[in-house]
Image (cartoon, grey):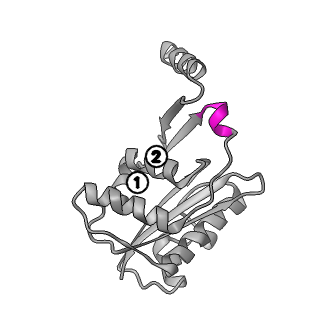
Amino acid sequence: MRRAIVLAIVSLVATPASAELRIPCLWNPFGGCSFSFVSPEYANKPVQPLEPEAALAAINAFRAENGLKPLVLDERLSRAAAMQSQAQAGRSWIGHSGTGGSTPKARALRAGFHAKIASENVASGLKSFGDVLSFWKQSSGHRTNLLRPNVTAIGVAMAKNSNGRPYWTLVLGAE
């Protein structure tokens, strides 16, 4: 174990521009999350603004690669995603429980989307939606959400906390 830690630190220092160390969340019974340690160079990069149409195109390209139908961008789901991104940024903590303990499906309904299905991916600290999507593709729980065959629409949002840390949310749903 000690050797593995030393190797991880050495590789992080040896390749600072691309170094990343992911540690699975051991406390999450559902999987789908990890902690990432990134290089100082990456940490100092500015956060790129979210472009929802570009995010939709990237998600649809990934779905097409996996034989799935494209999704549409839904403003109501984007409002639900914004609720969660703002809640996470406000408390500087990532998770799926929202204000007042709300769930993704409850937030979708509050935004006017009557979901039969609602699932959610969240991320924090990554500097662009492209980086977030790459991370989600490599995480089994997040990947499962991206490739749900029975969803028809998405909403996406990003909010920053008082320190400028980004909190990204993707809500996928079907009415």
Q: Residue 139, image x and y in percent? A: 40, 46
Disc 2 designates what residue? 135
The answer to whether residue 120 is seen in the rendering is no
Residue 49: quarter of image: bottom right
1 or 2: mark nearer the eye: 2
Comparing 114 with 38, the one in front is 38
Say which label, 1 or 2, has the lower sequence index: 2
> Eyeballing the image, is 9 above or below 146?
above
Asked if 73 appears above or below 55 in the picture, the reply is below
| Residue closest to the far top | 3
| Region rendered in magenta | 38-43
Check disc 1 and report its element: helix, strand or loop: helix
Name the residue type under label 1: His
- Count of marks overlaid on the render: 2
Q: Position of residue 165 (x, y in %)?
A: 69, 51
- Asked whether 39 falls inside the magenta stretch, the response is yes
Q: Which mark is residue 142?
A: 1
Observer-nearest of 162 and 67: 67
